[in-house]
Amino acid sequence: MAYYEIGEIAPRKPAAGVEVRIVHGERLTVGFFTIAPGAAVPEHAHPHEQIGTVLTGRMELTIAGDKRLVSAGAAYQIPPDATHSARCLEGPAEVIEIFAPVREDWR
C-alpha cells in the first residue's frame, strides 16, 4: 500500500507542453496529465488498454481515425494497439488516464 501527493511526483514531458506524473500499481499505471493550450500528444499506439477522463479543459481526441471533442466530465476508452492522438483546445487540460497492464516503458 502507498500514498502519493501528485504535485510532488516529478513530471515527465513526453511532448512540448505536455506533462505527466505517473503512479504504478501491481497491474496498472495511472497518468496525471497537464496539457497546455495548443499542445498536442502526437499520434501513437501501445499494447495497453487505456481509459481516461477529462477533469478540466477541452481537447480534440482522435482514436483510430474517429475525431471527437472532449471536455470536462467526458471519459473515453482506447483499445490496445489503437492509434490515437490529442490536442488541447482550451486549458490547460487536466486529464487522468489508466493503463493496463502496467506501462513498463514508463518506469
Image (spheres, helix red, strand yellow):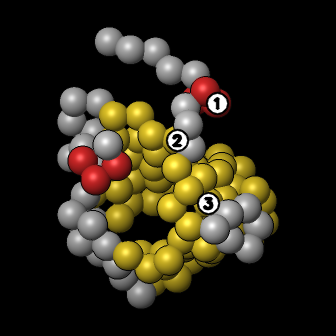
Does 93 sit above or below residue 89? Answer: above
Does residue 40 appear left or right of residue 12 in this picture?
right
Q: If the image is split into quadrants, where does the C terminus sit?
A: top left
Residue 56 seen: yes
Three-letter code, disc 3: Val
Pointer 1 residue = 7
Q: If the image is split into quadrants, where does the N terminus sit?
A: top left
Which residue is pictured at 55% across the width and 32% down the height?
9
Does residue 83 appear left or right of residue 74 in this picture?
left
Identify the residue at the far top of this view: 1
Which residue is pictured at 38% across the width and 14% down the height?
2
Which residue is pictured at 75% across the width and 56% down the height?
92
Q: Are marks 2 and 1 in contact (CB under 8 Å)?
A: yes
Q: Are marks 3 and 2 in contact (CB under 8 Å)?
A: no
Pointer 2 residue = 21
Rendered image quadrant of residue 6: top right
* Label placed on residue 18: 3
- In this rendered view, identify the residue nearer to me: 104 or 53: 104
Q: Determine crowd level at label 2: few under 14, some 14-19, many 20+ residues with C-alpha closer than 10 A.
A: some
Judged from the image, the secondary structure of the residue bearing numbered disc 2 is: strand
Earlier in the chain: of badge 3 and badge 1, it is 1
Q: Determine crowd level at label 1: few under 14, some 14-19, many 20+ residues with C-alpha closer than 10 A.
A: few
Three-letter code, disc 1: Gly
Which residue is pictured at 60% across the width and 53% down the height?
19
Q: Determine crowd level at label 3: few under 14, some 14-19, many 20+ residues with C-alpha closer than 10 A.
A: many
